[in-house]
Image (cartoon, helix red, strand yellow):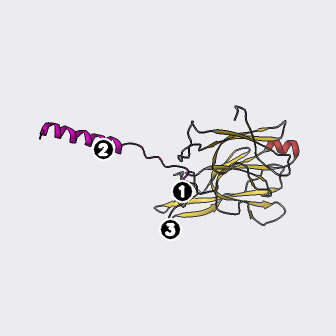
Amino acid sequence: MNWQLYKKGITVVLLLFLFSCKEKVYTPKVIYESPKREEVKPKDTSEVLVADLPIHFANTDVLLHPVGKIRSYSGKLTTYESGAYSYTITNLGDTEITGYLDNLLVQKITQDTLVPLLPEKKMITSITFLRKHFEKTQKPFLLMALYDQDTNKDQLINTNDIKAMYLSEIDGEKLTKISPDQMEWIDWNYQESLQRIYFRCVADTDQNGKFEKSDKVHYFYVDLKADLWEAKEYFPVGN
């Protein structure tokens, strides 16, 4: 046996193994096969559910109470995924609420009752008050980015799943998902002249669990004047 060739062969195999170990492991956003066994994750007792003080958008008749979690580390409370010592769970702009929220409670200013906007567990990351539409029509609507399904089958609903887009009246009525299932919402804008929301989504065309530039982008609009909010696809770059 040629020991020199044998040792060189072993060295090449080891180098290939080491290089393969250094490749980045990608966690897919979508798992298409159902899990064989359901596992119940233990409750995280380090998390505490809190509500921010109510938010009021001018000239509307409701108060909005954001609800989210803070985490406890070594006896200290921190906002969800922020690492800052604070009881505040949201950031507030002129027309937008952002954060990692479990729900949004709605309170009519003539009542003390708090009503959850979402009927079941989801994660909200942004809530936009469509002020231009309100000033034009006096109809107050909310546009929300949230995660509503465990698309990667890890028994959690969080930012590792597919981002969806919802519309609602400010009091929680007409809550409607407008982005298609299994498509990741990209961005949106409001066209005042038509009273429409335009938005884009990307579909996992090759079903590899990733959203990549090679996947197909879809274009939609929703007519806010309609009684039933329905996303209609249009084709600015063809089919």
Element at badge 2? helix
Residue 122 position in % (x across, y down): 64, 58
Residue 56 position in % (x across, y down): 77, 53
- The structure residue drawn at horizontal position 57% and vertical position 36%, both measured from the top left corner, is 214
Q: Nearer the viewer, mark 1 or mark 2?
A: 1
Element at badge 3? loop
> For mark 2, what is the residue?
17
Residue closer to the observer: 100 or 37:
37
Element at badge 1? loop
Give the vertical position of 212 relative to 91 (above or below).
above
Q: Nearer the viewer, mark 3 or mark 2?
A: 2
Structural distance between the alpha carbons of marks 1 and 2: 29 Å
Give the vertical position of 5 relative to 169 (above or below).
above
Magenta stretch holds residue 28? yes
Badges 1 and 2: C-beta atoms under 8 Å apart? no
The numbered dot on residue 126 is: none
> For mark 1, what is the residue?
33
Kindly identify the amino acid type of the residue bearing the numbered disc 1: Glu
Magenta stretch holds residue 160? no
